[in-house]
Image (tube, grey):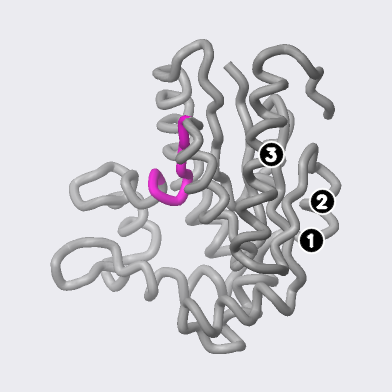
Amino acid sequence: MLTVGLTGGIGAGKSEVARLLASYGAVLVDSDRIAREVVAPGTEGLAKVVAEFGPGVLAPDGSLDRPKLGAIVFADEERRRALNAIVHPLVGARSAELQRAAGPDDIVVHDVPLLTENGLAPYYDLVVVVDAAPDSQLDRLVRLRGMTEDEARSRMAAQARREERLAIADLVLHNDGTVEELREQVAAVWRELKARQDGTQPASG
């Protein structure tokens, strides 16, 4: 089994890279999806979030109102740390469970937005970083996700600096160009991962 940590700044294109790697046969462990599952209605995670932030973070149907909670935690570092202290251990436990279920010959890709921030690089055989210039990130967040420029800049500022992500990277995909250029890079990265999994090239790091 080869374990890969995949990360990148918001709007860098990490989700597209994860989707492409899965299409090649990677076992994808999606931390964002798991983070939603562990605070779904009826879960211990949601109960802890409500106890910490109050019932105002619930939508009328009893689910978590993610935009409302996001507005709170992205404006206040202390509140964001409080949320992370609840969610991250639950996500970590579920991610480990999914990795254990993978086969010995699988390439397991952990899609982890906050890999750099949480110091998780040593837990993977190698780290792949999807890199994009801040201007590219900002454009995508405003144009594709409908954020205001202030919202986008706030989300970007809450993450690790670009230099910090690149410092932990074993492999880097540069995503300031076209989708086709990104696909070509992902194909090359997959060949690299397969070579390392097959033992024809030692992992760096």
Amino acid tagged 1 = Arg
Residue at image coords 83%, 29%: 205
Q: Which mark is residue 189?
A: 3
Amino acid tagged 3 = Val
Residue at the disc numbered 1: 162
Structural distance between the alpha carbons of marks 3 and 2 = 16 Å
Structural distance between the alpha carbons of marks 1 and 2 = 6 Å
Q: Does the rendering let one see residue 117?
A: no
Magenta region: 27-34
Residue 133 at x, y percent in the picture: 76, 70
- Mark 1 and mark 2 in contact? Answer it, CB < 8 Å: yes
**Horizontal placement of 198 versus 165: left or right?**
left
Of the numbered discs 3 and 2, the one sitting upstream in the chain is 2
Structural distance between the alpha carbons of marks 3 and 1 = 20 Å
Q: Given the current orientation, which residue lies at the most extreme left position?
A: 61
- Mark 3 and mark 1 in contact? Answer it, CB < 8 Å: no
Residue at image coords 17%, 63%: 62
**Horizontal placement of 103 versus 76: left or right?**
left
Residue 8 at x, y percent in the picture: 66, 55
Dividing the picture into quarters, in which one does residue 204 lie?
A: top right
- Mark 3 and mark 2 in contact? Answer it, CB < 8 Å: no
Above or below, comparing residue 197 to residue 111 in the picture: above
Asked whether residue 13 is drawn in magenta, I would say no
Label 2 SS:
helix
Tell me the crowding category of disc 1: few under 14, some 14 to 19, or many 20 or more residues within 10 angstroms, Cα based: some
Residue at the disc numbered 2: 166
Of the numbered discs 3 and 1, the one sitting upstream in the chain is 1
Q: Quadrant of the N terminus?
A: top right
Q: Does the rendering let one see residue 93?
A: yes
